[in-house]
């Protein structure tokens, strides 16, 4: 650049050339300090090339050495620095008026030469120059500033979110105790929901978080309690050996009744993943089986001397089985809705006196210890959700 501003030749002057052969092919390359001969790649015609021109450009002889005054040389250099511009020396090319005057003096008519047909040639792309043209220093500096500001704002938002979650998680302990004393279960559900969401943001997975999660499920079960007990509901639905398959749909009304909370027994069935809920459903008519598929109950039953439990559930489906001894009914429990009760306040809301029943109090304590210590039990909903997604993909 210093040599071009001075109007002299550089020590190593790059002199690219582009000449047109008689066949119309453009031959490109770089000149040497001496003359040389090259061949056209299409017609193999020998072409003579002049050596590098170390003298300033004139109107008839072009050169990479810029002619003219300092202002003209500086203008040419600045045009070369602009991206996407091909530097050309306007003063080195004769104007159209001068070409017309010369043609008029020679007496030759001004005709347009028909160029020969050229073969299709793909454009040449220089990736280095393209990258330099796109990623200019100013653009890189601007992009860096934008990324720095975005990163700072994202970090501040994340810190504020964590601080709000810590405050909510810390205040929920006192709030849950106060709401339980007031027996306001609608407000309790809202407080527990906020606490669970805050615990998930903080990555909580300890006994306190598991207890809060189970208490939320208990509260939802109490607030969606069915209006009648399961035996009464099934009796009104018409479960009997004389019921035909025509009115099976009427028996499915159990699905919309709400949550049933039962003090009963959980017996393992033949399948190690299924359990039978021993409930006094229809006295004298043992043709109804309440079935539950929940593998995580195996861990709970291992630590109990008796299979008695206090639990809540919703009905997922009703199936009819016909056999030699008559018709039987299978009430399928929704495993997502199954919950073990651990709170004395919820049991008292249902009419059970925990203070006067030491066995029930010990049972709730045992279920509370299991809920707080079992990671598998707390993750049962995620396991069932993934299983349903896998079945849907198949």
Image (spheres, helix red, strand yellow):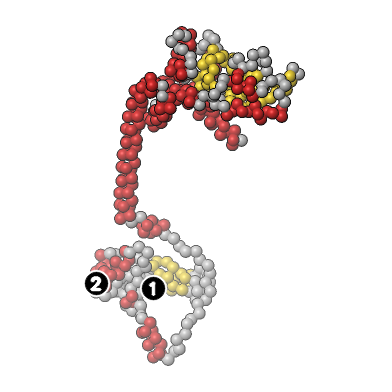
Name the one closer to the observer, 394 or 270: 270
Q: Is residue 268 above or below residue 52?
A: above
Vertical comparison of 393 with 188: above or below: below
Task: Give the quadrant of the C terminus.
Answer: top right
| Upstream in sequence: badge 2 or badge 1 | 1
* Residue drawn at (43%, 10%) of the image: 355
Mark 1 falls on what kind of element?
Answer: loop
- Taking the spot 56% from the left edge, 14% from the top edge, the residue there is 265
Q: Which mark is residue 71?
A: 2
Residue shown at 36%/81% (left/top)?
95
Asked if one can make out residue 3 in the rendered structure from this viewpoint, the answer is yes
- Between 57 and 234, the one lying in front of the other is 234
The crowd level at tag 1 (other Cα within 10 Å; few <14, some 14-19, many 20+) is few
- Residue 39 placed where, x, y %? 48, 70
Foreground: 5 or 173? 173
Q: Which residue is mark 1?
A: 50
Q: Quadrant of residue 133?
A: bottom left
The answer to which of 127 and 253 lies nearer the viewer is 253
Residue 383 position, x and y percent, is 52, 28
Secondary structure beneath label 2: helix
Q: Residue 98: x and y, percent?
A: 36, 84
């Amino acid at each position: 650049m210093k040599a071009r501003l001075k109007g002299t030749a550089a020590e190593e002057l790059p002199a690219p050339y582009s000449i047109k052969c008689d066949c119309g092919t453009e031959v490109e390359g770089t000149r040497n300090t001496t003359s040389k001969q090259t061949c056209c790649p299409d017609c193999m015609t020998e072409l003579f090339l002049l050596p590098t021109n170390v003298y300033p450009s004139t109107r008839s002889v072009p050169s990479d050495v810029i002619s003219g005054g300092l202002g003209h040389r500086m203008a040419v250099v600045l045009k070369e620095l602009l991206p996407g511009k091909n530097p050309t020396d306007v003063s080195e090319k004769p104007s159209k008026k001068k070409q017309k005057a010369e043609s008029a003096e020679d007496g030759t008519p001004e005709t347009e030469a028909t160029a020969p047909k050229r073969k299709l040639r793909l454009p040449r792309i220089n990736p280095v120059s393209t990258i330099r043209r796109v990623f200019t220093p100013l653009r890189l500096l601007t992009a860096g500033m934008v990324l720095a500001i975005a990163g700072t704002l994202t970090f501040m938002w994340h810190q504020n979110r964590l601080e709000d979650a810590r405050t909510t998680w810390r205040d929920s302990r006192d709030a849950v105790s106060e709401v339980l004393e007031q027996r306001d279960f609608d407000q309790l559900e809202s407080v527990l929901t906020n606490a669970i969401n805050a615990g998930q943001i903080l990555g909580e997975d300890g006994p306190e978080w598991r207890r809060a999660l189970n208490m939320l499920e208990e509260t939802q079960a109490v607030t969606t309690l069915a209006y009648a007990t399961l035996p009464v509901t099934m009796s009104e639905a018409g479960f009997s050996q004389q019921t035909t398959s025509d009115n099976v749909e009427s028996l499915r009304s159990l699905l919309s009744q709400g949550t049933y909370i039962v003090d009963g027994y959980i017996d393992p069935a033949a399948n190690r993943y299924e359990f039978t809920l021993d409930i006094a459903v229809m006295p004298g008519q043992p043709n109804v089986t309440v079935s539950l598929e929940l593998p995580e109950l195996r861990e709970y039953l291992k630590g109990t001397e008796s299979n008695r439990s206090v639990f809540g559930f919703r009905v997922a489906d009703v199936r009819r089985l016909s056999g030699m001894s008559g018709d039987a009914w299978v009430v399928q429990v929704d495993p997502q809705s199954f919950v073990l009760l651990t709170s004395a306040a919820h049991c008292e809301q249902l009419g059970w006196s925990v203070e006067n029943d030491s066995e029930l109090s010990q049972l709730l304590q045992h279920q509370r210890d299991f809920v707080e210590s079992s990671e598998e039990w707390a993750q049962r909903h995620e396991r069932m959700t993934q299983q349903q997604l896998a079945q849907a993909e198949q």
